[in-house]
Amino acid sequence: MSAGPVQAAVPRALRGTAAAVFDTDGVITDSARVHAAAWKTAFDAHLRDRQVRQRPFDERDDYLRYVDGKSRLDGARSFLESRGLDPAEDEVRAVAADKERLFTERLREHGIDAYPGTVRLLRVLRSAGIPRAAASASRHAPELLDHAGVRDLFDTVVDGTEAARLHLPGKPDPALFLEAARRLGVPAARTAVIEDALAGVAAGRRGGFGLVVGVDRARTPQTRAALLAHGADIVVDDLADLLASED
Ligand SMILES: O=P(O)(O)OC[C@H]1O[C@@H](O)[C@H](O)[C@@H](O)[C@@H]1O
C-alpha cells in the first residue's frame, strides 16, 4: 500500500518513527550561541579572578564538550574540572549565577528566533499526526519557545525546571528524553531524538531511541565526526536538509 500524501511528506529517515523529541537550544531556537557567549564571559572572568594561567574558554570546542546540553551547575562544574581546577561547590554556584545574569541580559537585548528548517519539519510532522516534544536541560526553554513563537508546535515540553522537580539526572543520562517520550505515549524504540549536543546524542543512544539525529550547527568535519562518535545515526547541518533530501 502506498503512503498517503501527508505521510509521504515525512522525511524518509523519520518514516519508521511514531514520535519525535527535539532538544531546544541549538535545535529549535538559535539560543545555544547566547548560552555559549554568556558562559565565555563568566568562565573567563572566573579564570582571571583565580589567577590561573589557563587559555580562555573556547565558545565552540569547550562549549560542545563540557557545557552544551547539561544543566547549569553540571556545565559549570564539568568545564572547571576539565581544566583540573577541582572547584568547590560555592565556586560552581557563583560562576553559574554569573552566567545566568549575563544570559538573561543578552536574551532581553537580542531576542531569540526559531530555525526555519526546524519549524518546517515540525509542521510536516504535525500534519502527519506524529507527536512532538521539546526537551531541554535549560530552565529557560519554555520562555525561549514562547519568544520564538513555536510553543504550540509541541505536545509537551520537559525543561530544566521539570527535570529538577522529577530528580531526573542530566545528559548524557537519557532520563529527560525518556520522560518526554513517556508523555507522548510512544516507546523510545519508536521515537526519534534530535540533538546538537554531544551529551544529548549520547543520551539518545543510551536511551535506546529508534533514531538519533545529530544537528551540526558548526558545520565542521570535526563536529560532525564527534556527533557520530557519540551516537548519532545521521548528522545534518540543518533539519531542512532532511526535507530537501526528499526533493
Ligand atoms: O541555565 P539554563 O538556562 O537553565 O540552561 C542550562 C543549560 O541548558 C542547555 O540546554 C544549554 O546547552 C547550556 O548551555 C545551558 O547551560
Image (cartoon, rainbow, N blue to C red):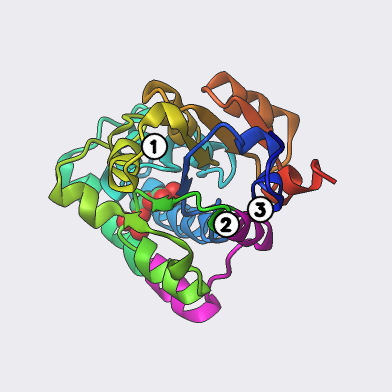
> Residue 210: image x %, image y %?
48, 27
As shown in the figure, which amino acid type bears the numbered disc 1?
Phe
User: What secondary structure is found at the residue carrying circle 3?
Assistant: helix
Q: Nearer the viewer, mark 3 or mark 1?
A: 3
How many numbered tags mark residues here? 3
First in sequence: mark 2 vs mark 3? 3
The reply to whether residue 198 is in sight is yes
As shown in the figure, which amino acid type bears the numbered disc 3?
Val
Residue tagged 1: 79
First in sequence: mark 1 vs mark 2? 1
> Residue 195: image x %, image y %?
52, 41
- In the picture, the quarter occupied by the N terminus is top right
Residue 122, disc = 2
Q: Which residues are magenta?
A: 102-124
> Residue 129: image x %, image y %?
51, 53
| Label 3, label 1: how far apart the Cα atoms are | 45 Å
User: What secondary structure is found at the residue carrying circle 1?
Assistant: helix
